[in-house]
Image (cartoon, rainbow, N blue to C red):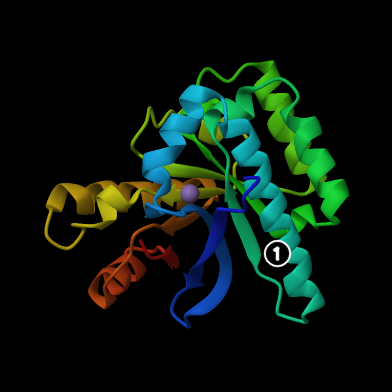
Amino acid sequence: IERGELILEYQPQWEMPEQRLIGVEALVRWEHPERGRINPIEFIPVAEESGLIHAIGDHVLRTACRQQVAWQAAGLQPVTIAVNISALQFRRQGFLERVSRIIDETGADPTGLDLELTESALMQPGPEIEAQLASLRGMGFGLALDDFGTGYSSLTYLKRLPVALLKIDQSFVRDVLSDPNDAAIVHTIIGLSRSLGLDVIAEGVETEEQRISLGEAGCDLYQGY
Ligand code: MN
């Protein structure tokens, strides 16, 4: 962090059928001076084990907030920036205060930011978790449930928590055209989202055929791998 080796890349999120850019997901990469680019799948688990995830999480959120302000200053069309929040960050005492401080410090607009939480962040949602989510919503943040379908997929969260967007995990999207089980799961998640009035976005869409198939199934939002 001190050496500025953690950088963010912004993966576009699109709306079908017009292919309108609706947002970007901020994805962290480590530009290591000797080892080259290191993917988060390698270093985030280590950061979670060592506790550095909190400093990295703050850095990522702060960088995304500054980017939002910079894009706005440059006169670009505003798009939502989605930021991944680790379950450890979300469940740590003082998370709300850390987020508030970063918003104040950067002057970012929370209504243009989505926080992506995994199901493990919301496991056994008690009053504190619900209150925290309500506070984040109250500040203006959008809340998304990341990697949906890979964890416990508790329907209780969807009913009770102020999550507005489900993200279909890429593991189901990859073979959606060839594996009937994946197709069934994708269709079910889309149907569930629609019935509950939630938005749904497919992750890991890499081919036009996948995009069309998802559109036909009723999923209008997508992003790549
Ligand atoms: Mn994500």
The three-letter code of the residue at mark 1 reads Gln
Residue located at (58% from left, 20% from top)? 125
State the image quarter where residue 54 is shown.
top right
| Residue 162 visible in this rendered orientation of the protein | no
Residue at x 78% of width, y 82% of height: 75
Instruction: Give percent across and percent down for residue 221.
Output: 46, 65
Q: Residue at x 72, y 50 (%)?
A: 62
- The image shows residue 144 at horizontal and vertical percentages of 56, 46
Q: Which of 73/203 is in front?
A: 73
| Residue 209, image quadrant | bottom left
Residue at which label 1 appears:
67
Quadrant location of the C terminus?
A: bottom left
- Residue 134 location, x and y as percent? 74, 34
In this view, 108 is above or below 158: below
| Residue 47 in view here | yes
Q: Nearer the viewer, residue 149 or 108?
A: 108
Quarter occupied by residue 94: top right
Residue 73 left/right relative to 53: right
Of residues 21 and 75, which is closer to you in this image?
75
Location of the N terminus (image quadrant): top right
Q: Residues within 10 Å of mark 1 (few under 14, many from 20)?
A: some
For the point 36% across and 70% down, the residue is 215
Task: Measuring from the top left, give residue 201's x and y in whole percent.
Answer: 45, 58
Of helix, strand and loop, which one carries label 1? helix
